[in-house]
Every structure is written in structure tokens, then in C-alpha cells.
């Protein structure tokens, strides 16, 4: 296969750049894992190095393979990837890289930072999340109690109590520890 050496060299430039992306959380198994978004994307990110299916002789640009990320939190938000129930972080793309206007794609990547974000109640949007409900909805104290009461009134066993999760920040801490990533507050939107 013909190879555009110039392009490959360029995409392998050693400068350190940061990419941003979000994940959903896979709650199955012993520990929660960060899972890629998008239909048909079953990939669970690994602590440390993540390696895409890009073959050494393949061109990253034409293959469509690799790890996708945005260049800024602003671009990530513009596409709807920052919000409740999503975990957002900064990642380091390396290996073969393709750097576009807004996005980056790389053959390898590792998770560097997770942000404390997406923590609003998914039901009212006005309070901090504290519980995980069946159906993977995160909600705050007020909404949790409201739902619980409503169920009790109807004579339905409010089994949601048994699904209540430790606080969202504890979960993020657990994820950050698992991935060896630092956990910090998301920078305010004005700084994106
Ligand atoms: Zn709420």
C-alpha cells in the first residue's frame, strides 16, 4: 500500500497536545469503566495505554480508525457531549495523530484527567446529583425523595433506595483512581 510519508511524519509530531472527550459509565462488573459513546461503540477504556485497531501500515486519515477527541471543551459541549450522566476528561493522543480544525484522532491515547462535571440532577437540573436511579439516571436529593414518596403513595415498593449510589464525586474518584487520572474541577466555561 502506498504510503504518504510526509503526512505520517507530520501526524507523529512529538508535541504534547491535549484532547477532550466524554464517556458514559459502564456499571457492570466489579468496577465502573469508561465506555466510548455512540451506537455500536462497545469500547471500554483501559487504564494507561489504549491502542486502536489501526494497523502499522494503515493510514489513519483514510482508515477512519483511532480515538476521536475534541481540541477544546467548547467544541465538546457544542456537540452535546458535556452533560449529566457523562464523564468528561482530558486525554493525551499519541502514536499516529491526525489533527483537524476541531478534532483530533490518534492511534493511541491515555486518560490524563477527569473533570468533576455533569453533576446536575438529570431530572430538575437544579441540584447536585447524589443518587443513581435504575435506568442510570442520576438525580439529586430532592428529586430522589420526591420519586420515593410518589412510589410509596401508590403502594409501590420504592426499590430505588437499594439502587442509591454513593455520591457522584465518590464515583468519579473511584474512576479517576482506576484510570490513574487526576481529578479536578472542570475549568469555568469562560476559560474554555
Ligand atoms: Zn432534582
Image: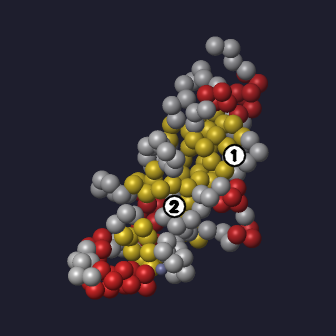
The residue sitting at 51% across, 81% down in the picture is 127
List x then y, in percent, for residue 88.
56, 60
Looking at the image, can residue 90 be seen?
no
User: Which image quarter is the N terminus in?
Assistant: top right
List x then y, in percent, for residue 133.
36, 70
- The part of the image, by quadrant, that contains residue 163 is bottom left
Q: Secondary structure at mark 2?
A: loop
The answer to whether residue 143 is left or right of residue 58 is left
Structure colour scheme: secondary structure
Q: Is residue 6 above or below residue 47?
A: above
Identify the residue at the far front of this view.
154
Judge by depth and name the residue closer to the eye, 158 or 154. 154
Judge by depth and name the residue closer to the eye, 20 or 121. 121
Q: Secondary structure at mark 1?
A: strand
The answer to whether residue 31 is left or right of residue 55 is left
Looking at the image, can residue 66 be seen?
yes
Q: Is residue 115 above or below residue 147?
A: above
The residue carrying mark 1 is 103
The residue sitting at 28% across, 86% down in the picture is 153
Of callouts 2 and 1, which one flags the residue occurring earlier in the amino acid sequence?
A: 2
Judge by depth and name the residue closer to the eye, 111 or 69. 69
List x then y, in percent, for residue 83.
56, 65
The residue sitting at 60% across, 23% down in the picture is 58
The residues bearing labels 2 and 1 have C-alpha atoms spaced at a distance of 19 Å
The residue carrying mark 2 is 86
The residue sitting at 39% across, 54% down in the picture is 26
The answer to whether residue 136 is left or right of residue 187 is left
Amino acid at each position: 500500500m502506498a504510503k504518504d510519508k510526509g503526512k505520517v511524519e507530520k501526524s507523529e509530531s512529538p508535541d504534547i497536545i491535549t484532547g477532550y472527550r466524554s464517556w458514559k459509565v459502564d456499571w457492570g462488573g466489579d468496577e465502573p469503566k469508561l465506555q466510548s459513546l455512540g451506537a455500536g461503540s462497545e469500547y471500554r477504556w483501559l487504564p494507561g495505554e489504549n491502542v486502536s485497531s489501526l494497523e502499522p501500515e494503515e493510514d489513519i486519515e483514510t482508515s477512519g480508525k483511532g480515538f476521536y477527541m475534541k481540541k477544546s471543551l467548547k467544541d465538546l459541549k457544542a456537540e452535546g457531549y458535556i452533560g449529566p450522566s457523562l464523564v468528561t476528561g482530558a486525554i493525551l493522543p499519541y502514536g499516529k495523530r491526525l489533527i483537524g480544525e476541531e478534532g483530533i484522532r490518534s492511534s493511541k491515547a491515555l486518560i490524563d484527567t477527569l473533570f468533576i462535571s455533569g453533576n446536575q440532577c438529570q431530572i430538575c437540573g437544579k441540584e447536585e446529583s447524589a443518587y443513581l436511579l435504575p435506568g442510570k439516571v442520576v438525580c439529586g436529593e430532592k428529586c430522589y425523595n420526591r420519586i420515593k414518596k410518589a412510589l410509596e403513595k401508590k403502594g409501590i415498593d420504592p426499590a430505588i433506595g437499594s439502587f442509591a449510589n454513593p455520591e457522584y464525586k465518590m464515583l468519579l474518584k473511584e474512576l479517576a483512581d482506576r484510570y490513574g487520572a487526576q481529578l479536578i474541577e472542570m475549568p469555568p466555561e469562560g476559560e474554555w
